[in-house]
């Protein structure tokens, strides 16, 4: 390698290094900007080797269905997607058929039919205005992407669901608002959704608000990023491949240079 090209290379490496420093520091300053800190839970899906816990996700689906789905939709998730969290075709068919969707019959009239596995999760309200009207003006957001849509999403969601406490005496809580120590501004339009034994788990797990929040978060984390396990698996294979390639290149380089070095 001549001097010009080696200089070119080192300059590029320096650029890459500084870009990485900027990216890392901008991330940490973003984290520093967060005023409220949430308890950091031990999620099975955290880290590069993390995977989803199927039983927790299935309990989470139950919490979503029995508690959250009264107010929140999940319009990006289709019933058939539940296959990835361990349900079979018949279970999914039965689960979907508990809901109804509108369709147009041969006479052009709007009629109802049971939902099919290929339908998206049926939303509780026909439109945003109806959703606001039923919740005192506050809009219950769609939960399909909520874990990705909030910084530190899983910990935030768990904290939010378990963060309903008595408001301090000096805080005025207007009608239709609720005090939550983890919500920005502390006043939220969502009433506390989780109470002891709010659902009855079939596997005998005790349904405390902490447990239900953990399960529904595991379910919503998967809904936000259903391809996470594949992505991590691919990442690990790529790293192993690169490692092998580096070793091979090193030995090839040694062999190619051996006769020249001997001279
Ligand atoms: C009675 C209706 C109702 C139920 C039941 C309910 N929510 Fe909500 N939720 C709301 C409303 C209304 C808002 C909007 C609050 C606001 O904007 O002040 C909201 C907001 C939220 C938010 C957004 C918070 C943010 O950072 O903006 C999340 C996340 C959420 N709910 C999750 C859940 C989960 C999970 C459940 C089930 C365990 C649930 N909700 C049950 C009505 C409900």
Image: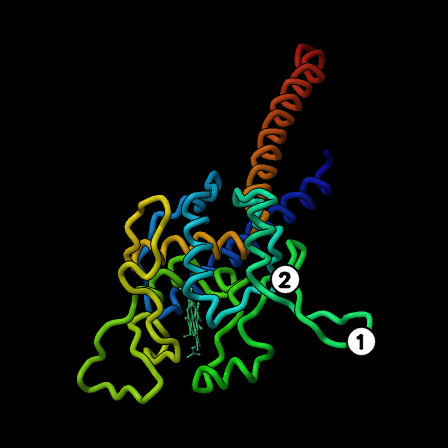
102 or 79, which lies in front? Answer: 102
Residue that label 1 marks = 108
Residue extending furthest toward the left: 169
**Residue 165 in sight from this viewpoint:** yes
Across and down, in percent, residue 45 comes to 45, 45
Residue that label 2 marks = 114
The residue located at (59%, 45%) in the rendering is 90
Specify the quadrant of the image occupied by residue 248: top right
Across and down, in percent, residue 243 comes to 59, 28
Q: Quadrant of ligand 1?
A: bottom left
Does residue 104 appear to the left or right of 214 in the view shown? right
Across and down, in percent, residue 209 comes to 30, 60
The quadrant of the image that shows the C terminus is top right
259 or 110, which lies in front? Answer: 110
Across and down, in percent, residue 206 comes to 28, 50
Q: Is residue 257 above or below residue 30?
A: above
Q: Is residue 55 above or below residue 130?
A: above
Does residue 168 appear to the left or right of 155 in the view shown? left
Q: How far apart are the alpha carbons under marks 2 and 1?
A: 18 Å
Q: Is residue 215 above or below residue 255?
A: below
């Amino acid at each position: 390698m001549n001097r010009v090209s080696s200089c070119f290379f080192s300059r590029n490496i320096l650029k890459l290094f500084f870009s990485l420093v900027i990216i890392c520091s901008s991330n940490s300053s973003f984290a520093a900007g967060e005023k409220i800190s949430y308890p950091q839970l031990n999620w099975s899906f955290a880290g590069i080797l993390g995977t989803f816990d199927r039983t927790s996700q299935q309990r989470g689906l139950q919490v979503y269905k029995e508690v959250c789905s009264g107010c929140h939709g999940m319009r990006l998730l289709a019933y058939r997607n539940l296959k990835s969290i361990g349900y079979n075709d018949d279970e999914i068919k039965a689960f979907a058929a508990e809901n109804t969707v509108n369709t147009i019959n041969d006479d052009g009239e709007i009629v109802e039919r049971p939902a099919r596995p290929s339908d998206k999760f049926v939303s509780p309200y026909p439109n945003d205005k109806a959703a606001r009207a039923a919740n005192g003006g506050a809009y219950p957001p769609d939960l399909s992407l909520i874990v990705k849509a909030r910084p530190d999403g899983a910990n935030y969601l768990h904290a939010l669901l378990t963060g309903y406490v008595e408001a301090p005496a000096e805080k005025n809580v207007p009608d239709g608002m609720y005090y939550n120590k983890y919500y920005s501004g502390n006043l939220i339009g969502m009433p506390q959704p989780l109470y002891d034994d709010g659902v009855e788990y079939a596997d005998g797990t005790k349904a405390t608000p902490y447990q239900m929040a953990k399960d529904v978060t595991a379910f919503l984390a998967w809904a936000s990023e259903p391809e996470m396990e594949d992505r991590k698996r691919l990442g690990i294979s790529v790293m192993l491949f690169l490692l092998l390639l580096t070793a091979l290149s090193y030995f090839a380089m040694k062999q190619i240079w051996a006769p020249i070095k001997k001279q």
